[in-house]
Amino acid sequence: MLHIISLDHDLKSLQEMRIAVRHAKEAQKIFRKFPQEKVDDIVKKIAEAAFKESESLARMAVHETGMGVIEHKKMKNELASIGVYESIKDEKTVGIIRKDHEKKVIEIAYPFGVIAAICPTTNPTSTAIFKTLISLKALNGIVVSPHPSAAHCTVEALKICHHAAVEAGAPEGLIGWITKPTMEATTELMKHRDIDLILATGGGGLVRAAYSSGKPAYGVGPGNGPVYLEKTANVQKAVQ
């Protein structure tokens, strides 16, 4: 009986993933024709909505994963929403983006299509927010596979982003997700024929799987920034 229940869960996860990819592909076909002004307005509305819920999403993440500090998660959510928006808002991503008359070169922006995004348990909501923003800014759709131990808070962040996007005029389904992710569904997502690019943040094995999927991939594996303690520091306090 336990085996059957486990199998059902895996199958449901796979089916949910496939439906999300299909909807994202259909929505992206519409979205890719949007003018720069409309794309920028949608991205702005997503950033503002996510920023507004920075603290509530931080509380969800800490409660669900048992990791981090609410105040710090809130700051990261703020950075991943309005901070990221401010850094990309003036980037031109539609049509002709640069002309070099001297070299006779014209650069034309072109979306990848549908992006598979893998989010970690360490920074689940902030990662979901910023990956959504940069994907839509470049006229792509996105389907997110959360870490199983952070699925609820990650999906809540994505629902906020999706609602804001649709309210601003984006097609339904442009932002998709797996509510109960499994390793099989995540692996199949990265290999899905309608996925055009992978943004993978997680453990080393997951990142290696993204790089070996046969798709273009950007991966960020485990690692922490180095910390230097000066000799006069109170070590116990500094470590805390």
Image: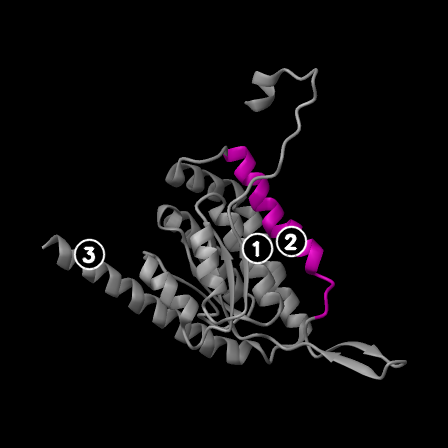
Residue at image mark 2: 84
Residue that sits furthest to the right in the current view = 102
- The colour scheme used here is one colour
Across and down, in percent, residue 184 comes to: 32, 62
How packed is label 1: few (under 14 Cα within 10 Å), some, or many (20 or more)? many
Q: Comparing marks 3 and 2, which lies closer to the viewer?
A: 3
Residue drawn 65% across and 56% down? 85
Q: Is residue 6 visible?
A: yes
How packed is label 2: few (under 14 Cα within 10 Å), some, or many (20 or more)? some
Residue drawn 64% across and 77% down? 110
Give the amino acid at mark 1: Phe
Q: Comparing marks 1 and 3, which lies closer to the viewer?
A: 3
Whether the residues at callouts 1 and 2 have beta carbons within 8 Å, the answer is yes
Magenta-drawn segment: 70-92
Label whose residue precedes the other's in the sequence (3 or 2): 3
Q: Quadrant of the C terminus?
A: top right
Give the amino acid at mark 3: Ser
Label whose residue precedes the other's in the sequence (1 or 2): 2
Residue at image mark 1: 130
- In the rendered structure, find residue 6 and report the number of the disc placed on it: 3
- In the rendered structure, find residue 183 and report the number of the disc placed on it: none
Whether the residues at callouts 3 and 2 have beta carbons within 8 Å, the answer is no
Label whose residue precedes the other's in the sequence (1 or 3): 3
- Look at the magenta stretch and give its main secondary structure: helix
Residue 233 lies, with reference to residue 79, above or below; the image says: above
SS at circle 1: helix
